[in-house]
Amino acid sequence: MDDYSVFGERERKGWADDSVAENYVTRFGPITDRIAEQLVSVVAPGPGRDILDLCCGQGNLTARLTESGAKVEGLDFSPTMLEKAARAAPAASLRQGDAQNLPYGEASFDAVTCNFGIPHVPDYNRVLSEVRRVLRPGGTFAFTCWAAPEANPAFGTALRAIKTHADLSSAPPQPDFFQFAHRETAETLLQAAGFRLAAHDILHFTWRLDAPGDLFDIYANATVAVSMLLKSQSAEIVDRIRGEMTAKVEADFAADGGYVVPVPAAMIVARP
Ligand SMILES: C[S@@+](CC[C@H](N)C(=O)[O-])C[C@H]1O[C@@H](n2cnc3c(N)ncnc32)[C@H](O)[C@@H]1O
């Protein structure tokens, strides 16, 4: 297997950072909240159901799941995010832990959710087999990731500018962040872990921005891997990336007195 350990350590450090966590919740949170609504409808929580919310982060989905009366566990490795989850989802049982090594017995849950967590984990195959292990027969695994850059104007704009201008030699290797956004890849990986793909849907959302430079600010301040990459670049390179992203937003996404940038996501539902 490729060595993604440096990537994994950076993720661990990044999500524990107060500023990244706060900016993530402010900028990405409003969209991931809306996607959380869809995950709730897929797993149909309710009294008597045991549900694990993996990579629960700020506890937005965790809280919605508890509102149904289900017994909910939230797991995340970031103490900073878990503090937020404790405020958002007081009825949930929260644990600090690694998605690659779940501290639960076999067949403990009726459903497992994971809203935008798996692309951040180095050994995603291990996560899938751990989820399979803790799910009960007939259970549901529902998770999300961002749509691939070629079909995702927000991520496409950012990653194109970075690929064009950045020196990527210092970036640690990492798994393909968008692999589960491709239906066939998702199906192959899930099947190898003992799942059947039940649904793979692209959901459409937008970022409403006040200024064309806001898209750069989001990636520079509210992400882990991209923000670290930008910090490793010279001021001149960062200016070029900011300039290209800002010009693209101004040219292509002006609407409603501001800027509206599509940021679609994939929602994947799998069953044992
Ligand atoms: C993009 S955020 C998603 C937060 C939230 N689920 C949402 O809907 O917005 C990714 C979350 O996964 C957590 N995470 C990343 N890698 C993890 C791992 N290996 N084990 C547990 N949590 C992890 C991070 O701490 C962070 O809270």
Image (cartoon, rainbow, N blue to C red):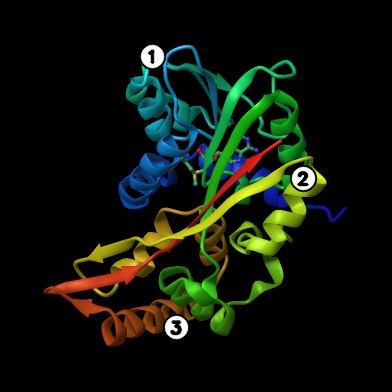
Q: Is mark 3 within 8 Å of ligand 1?
A: no
The CA distance from mark 1 to mark 2 is 30 Å
Q: Amino acid at mark 1?
A: Ala
The CA distance from mark 1 to mark 3 is 47 Å
Q: Amino acid at mark 2?
A: Asn
Frontmost of labels 2 and 3 is: 2
Return the x and y of residue 121 as percentages of the image width and height.
66, 45
- Image point 72% across, 40% down: which residue? 128
Residue 195 figure quarter: top right
Q: Amino acid at mark 3?
A: Arg
User: Which residue in the protein does label 2 denote?
Assistant: 125
- Image point 36% across, 29% down: which residue? 64
Foreground residue among 38 and 228: 38
Locate ligand 1 by image quadrant: top right
User: Which residue in the protein does label 3 denote?
Assistant: 240
Query: Dot 2 surroundings within 10 Å: few (below 14), some, or many (20 or more)?
Result: some
Return the x and y of residue 16 as percentages of the image width and height.
52, 36
Answer above or below: position of 36 versus 223.
above
Return the x and y of residue 216 as percentages of the image width and height.
38, 69
- At numbered mark 1, what does the secondary structure look like: helix, strand or loop? loop
Q: Is mark 2 within 8 Å of ligand 1?
A: no
Indicate the quadrant containing the C terminus: top left, top right, bottom left or bottom right. Answer: top right
Dot 2 or dot 3: first in sequence order is: 2
- At numbered mark 3, what does the secondary structure look like: helix, strand or loop? helix
Residue 21: numbered disc: none
Return the x and y of residue 66 as percentages of the image width and height.
39, 20
For the residues labelled 1 and 2, say whether their Cβ atoms are less than 8 Å apart: no
